[in-house]
Image (spheres, helix red, strand yellow):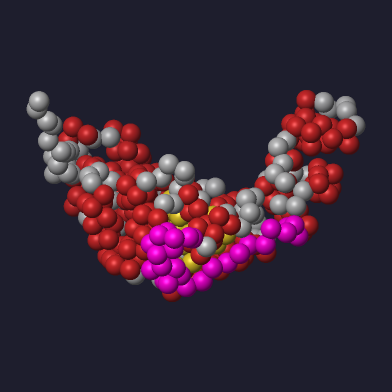
Amino acid sequence: MSTQPLPNETHERSRFDAETHARAVAYVKDHGLSVGQFADLLDYSRTTLAKYLAHDYTNCRAVEARLKAFFAREERVATGSKFRPTAVAQEILECCQYALDARAIVLIYGSPGLGKTTTVMEFIRRRWEEQQARDVVFVTASSITTPYGLVRNISAELGVSNYGCTHALVERILAELKRRPHLLIVDEANHLSIRSLELLRSLHDLSACGLLLMGSSALMQRIFSPKGRTAEDLEQFRSRIDYFKCLSPGATAREDLAAVARAHGFDEQTFDLVSPHVQKSRELLKLCRRFSLLRQLNPHADPKKVLEKALAQIFRAA
């Protein structure tokens, strides 16, 4: 039985992505950039980018990986207008900055709904917009994330080709991290296997990059309270953790909740009705959205009756 050769990055004309190319051309035009200026934004070769934009290229997979990562980060920047700096958010921002500056391993854990992911997105937006720095990689783990899937996602975020075996991907990631130090942020890190955690430790050790892991309290239990062989396997990872932060599961301050509600366009009347029934930002937004929808459908109904119906309809974690 014959086998197909593995794709070679130096012969990628057939894999040219017309959509990515069109978006790159439009970005240069819309922002009034020269090819050289756009290449500087991408931190990529001016010559290679010029050839790609002119349809005279030999390595489209590599340049398109960088372009896709660039556009993905731009989209994140555009979502930052609704952020409000709650007390919990300020703690998360400080942890992100510390992990980046000290190139340390930092753990953040707490119950869902405290705004961990939203705050990290704001940190990335600020680095991008205010500091003009593209030095944060954000990936999300899940129950099916494997070490290979993890490094593919990191590769894509870094803007390097994410094709090939795990070893090849790790080598590309390390080369990029050594060339441009980054902060790696992994959300839902409580889903990571021991092999994935050890892989992240290796990336941290070999590149001296910062590493921030976020998740539920199960993350701490997994790392600090393992049993048997697992405890031995994670010993080196534990020894490198510089700082960990437990986010209080208590109620968010009322003024913080009010700021979140205003940022999402909810009026004072809606907030006053809803606020006694919520403790966290996520709960607030879920209830406000449901209440507002029901008010639109039943404009003449008693607001208190509408609120009772909204409370009965939404799922609220204990």
Left or right of 96, for residue 181:
left
Left or right of 103, for residue 52:
left
Residue 288 appears in the rendering: yes
Q: Residue furthest front?
A: 228
Which is nearer the eye, 211 or 32? 211
Q: Residue 251: say if magenta.
A: yes
The residue sitting at 67% across, 47% down in the picture is 282
Residue 268 appears in the rendering: no
**Residue 131: image location, x then y, percent:** 46, 65
Q: Magenta residues, as a range?
A: 226-253
Q: Residue furthest left?
A: 2
The residue sitting at 19% across, 50% down in the picture is 48
The residue sitting at 13% across, 31% down in the picture is 4
The residue sitting at 55% across, 55% down in the picture is 218
Tell me where residue 84 sits by quadrant. bottom right
Left or right of 36, for residue 252:
right
Q: Quadrant of the N terminus?
A: top left
Left or right of 191, for residue 113:
right
